[in-house]
Amino acid sequence: MSRLALAVLVALAACRSDADSNAPTVTVHVLAGTAGEADATVISYSPTGELIDEELADPTGDAFVATTDGALISVFYPGDPSTATAQIQVVTTEAPAAGGDITIFGPPDPPSGPPTVVGVLQVEPVQPITADSYAIELGCYTFTETTLVNPIDLAAACVGTDLNVNALVLATSAGTLAGYAATRLPLGDGGVVFAPAQWDTTTGSIPITLDDGVAPALDWVLYSDGLPFAAQPIAGTAPVWNGLVVDGAEVHANVTAGALSQVTTRELAGAPAAIEFGAADFLPPLAASLALDTSRSLALTWTASAIGADAIDAHLTWTTGTTTVVWDAVLPPDATGVGFPPADSALAALVVPPAATPSARLRYIDSPAAQSFADVLAAGIQADASTAPPVVVAKPATGEVRETDATGFASP
């Protein structure tokens, strides 16, 4: 889609509001990452598909939309129209009560220029090592080098919040780890010189216990000053790298059986003494029940499951021409269906329901920070589709986000 065509259609959306000026309104805060998304279109409509209002977000990303009891809100992220293949994202959820507000955290806009360089990192080991490749993890990026002769530019994002640089250097020979070194050093005027006195060849070892007959696939990532390091699968034990300051860890546990999966993400403060998973750490598996009715403008239905979740995410993806459309309907756990935004909205002109069956996933999500769907809405919907699918609920400081999924549609 050309930039001109997109501009015309978005302008149309801004002029399409036919809502009663006396109707109750809600405020929708539309964010691209953490910045306001001024190009977003916001629509309110009834559960039966009647358009109520259509507004363009202001320069801060706010849209003030007329609503009624039981209305739905859809937010349209137009993506980058300058690319040859665009990804459009639509997020639908329940409208808050009149006078209330809701925040949608969508995909961040792409960087407008090269990263800001604040210095360089020079690795100068005191002890030589026989290696043919070096992976230098900085949290914001991993550099792969054949030697350590050349300095590496430090982007501002690599410094974290405390003006320290964290680094994990992995030396390999023919694909096998020969040694590693890790550090946290203050950023000097010109950057950082890391001169490890020796290469470590062993790591700390955290035991993993699986109870109640569960056998998930596990992986984890360590965090140092909020930046991710050492992402890898783990089994039996989990490694902790000497010298790497670990402020937190995130463990992913996945039990998959065909099209059904149970996924638990555990957030930890620091490095744990042990990792243990049992049946209670997973939501029960779903039965596939998602159904698509294209005669009703892409209506989705499913069978509700009372399994202790806080929210449902009906996640659809399809391609029309060179445009990929990602639609997430985030609803309360007792919901049994949702319709696509009405055909008489400008958003529908940009997002045409698919002629072929889209890929689909029905997800039930439980957050340790939420007691109900109202809590999920109050924290804001995390709808960045680059995480494929979006995480939906806010990331807790500690605790488990449990999810159970059914991919695809139920057999007719």
Image: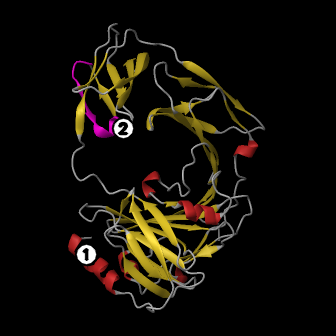
Q: CA distance from mark 1 to mark 2?
A: 34 Å
Query: Label 2 amino acid?
Result: Cys
Q: Measured from the top left, where is residue 98 in percent x and y?
A: 55, 80
N-terminal of the two: label 1 or label 2?
A: 1
Q: Is 334 covered by the magenta stretch?
A: no
Q: Is residue 173 left or right of residue 310?
A: left
What residue is disc 1 on?
A: 7
Relative vertical location of residue 86 with respect to residue 291 in this rendering, above or below:
above
Q: How is the image coloured?
A: secondary structure
Relative vertical location of residue 187 with respect to residue 51 in this rendering, above or below:
above
Identify the image quadrant of the N terminus.
Answer: bottom left
**Which residue lies at the image location 36% right of the left edge and 13% below the top edge?**
196
Q: Verify CB contact (< 8 Å) between mark 1 and mark 2.
A: no
Element at badge 1? Answer: helix
Q: Is 151 covered by the magenta stretch?
A: yes
Residue 221 visible in image:
yes
Q: Measured from the top left, where is residue 342 in percent x and y?
A: 47, 83
Residue numbers of the magenta segment: 148-161
Q: Is residue 80 left or right of residue 406?
A: left
**Which residue lies at the image location 27% right of the left edge and 65% below the top edge?**
81
Rendering quarter of residue 84: bottom left
Q: Measured from the top left, where is residue 331 in percent x and y?
A: 60, 68
Q: Nearer the viewer, mark 1 or mark 2?
A: 2
What residue is disc 2 on?
A: 140
